[in-house]
Image: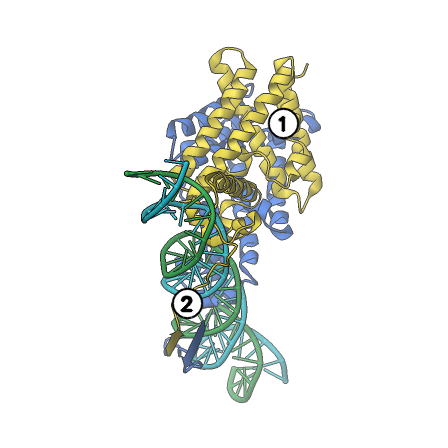
Chain colours: A yellow, B blue, C cyan, D green
Amino acid sequence: MMTIIIDVNRSFYFQPGADQLRLTDEQASDNRRLVVETASRMFRLHGIENISVASIMKESGFTHGGFYNHFKSKEDLATKAISTSFERATNDLSEKLSSGRNSQKGLTFVIADYLSSSHRDTNSGGCPASAFPVDASRNGKDIQTTFSKGIEEYLNIFADQIGESEHDARQEAIGLLSGLVGALILSRAVKKSNEKLSNELLGSARKHFCKGRLR
Amino acid sequence: MMTIIIDVNRSFYFQPGADQLRLTDEQASDNRRLVVETASRMFRLHGIENISVASIMKESGFTHGGFYNHFKSKEDLATKAISTSFERATNDLSEKLSSGRNSQKGLTFVIADYLSSSHRDTNSGGCPASAFPVDASRNGKDIQTTFSKGIEEYLNIFADQIGESEHDARQEAIGLLSGLVGALILSRAVKKSNEKLSNELLGSARKHFCKGRLR
DNA sequence: TGTACATCAGTGAACGCGCGTTCACTGATGTAC
DNA sequence: TGTACATCAGTGAACGCGCGTTCACTGATGTAC
């Protein structure tokens, strides 16, 4: 078996048109931000390994070649996308909690929101703590470092809200976050085949983790 | 730009050697079982999308060409691998629980075992309920159906053990399974970057979910 | 403030690789009579 | 029970495709003087 490949005229490249011009620094960093946000959404929804660099760039309105002007690698982008998701999510969380007067009652709102069918079905991927842990566990140290920081932030916010003695609050926060993440992930995993079970997982977990907190 | 590809002698194929012979039905189904078990382990450890058909076949001691003699597609294998994992896992679980005399105490053993560092670090991938949910949520109905059945089985076993009124037991089982799955997944996701946090997640979740069950 | 030149975001083709799947081929096993 | 023939698990090459990454090239913007 022999294959002969003759490649004619290897060094012919596209010449950009006359309307091709260098962007200002501000435009460039706006573009970078846009790509990170697109990636954050697509990664959370479909998983990091299942979304290509080209599709992120296309969804952001660019061709894929320019990707490496902004990011060292796909992993570099993933790291930035994860930390951006967590920043936004923990800000939202703090806001929701600070608007609720009674702290334990505030938590029940957050739990109900987290374990709602609209969070399960969101087409932006929802909470990064539920979207990324399996990707993180299969990836290297850089991505895990970013993920860990996000988890710590979540735990701090929950523990602050729970109050009690510091150690108990932290332990309670860990139990709560684990329960929320587990229930949401499981309910997503069965939704297409058994929506009844999916809803039951959300509803029962909601009741279970609100118990003793209400009012 | 033009590329010319000349492919010489396209139709030359390998001829099996003289020691090449048809297997008995039993050998063939033993081989099939072996491939499913190898896949189950590799899929749980690295995720379904991250393991190739060729690598599963190689790890099982075969070349990849024969794969489609046994399975309709990679998804077909994934479905069989998931259900096999659940069968084994739920059998193990029942066994562990039935050996413990007091039912609530039996559960605390299971919780401690589930949230142990050796389960987190197992190089066979461990419990399918924690290994597959994110893969399942990103896959189609066939895989989710298999996954749902496994989850139902887990919930039934937990609920039986918990006892109480039937409805409360089911709700409690959902809370417990969610917590176990969430804590294990999170602890795996931070292990490479922050082992202290990883251990804390396991330990605190263990205490949290054993509370009120001990003795 | 004006000028000369380096920088760099974007383009689209290409590279090298690995994926899931298909294929022609073999010959002992399985089976229909 | 004996015989003729179809079945089928395994092999390794190949297909077609998509991936992450690299590349040469452009010219207005950024910057050093």
Point out residue D23 in the picture as x, y percentages from the top left corner: 36, 59
Which is more toward the observer, D4 or A159? A159
- Bin the neighbour count of mark 2 within 10 Å (Cα to Cα): few under 14, some 14-19, many 20 and up: few
- Bin the neighbour count of mark 1 within 10 Å (Cα to Cα): few under 14, some 14-19, many 20 and up: many
Type of residue at label 2?
Phe
Above or below: residue A35 compared with residue A84? below
Which is more toward the observer, A5 or B46? A5
Point out residue B61 in the picture as x, y percentages from the top left corner: 39, 61
Q: Chain of mark 1?
A: B
Whether labels 1 and 2 belong to a single chain: the reply is no
The quadrant in which the N terminus of chain A is found is bottom left
Q: Quadrant of residue A75?
A: top left
The mark found on residue A12 in the picture is 2
- The residue tagged 1 is B172
Type of residue at label 1?
Glu
Point out residue A73 in the picture as x, y percentages from the top left corner: 41, 47
The structure residue drawn at horizontal position 56% and vertical position 16%, both measured from the top left corner, is A161
Q: Is residue A91 visible?
A: yes
The structure residue drawn at horizontal position 64% and vertical position 41%, both measured from the top left corner, is A123
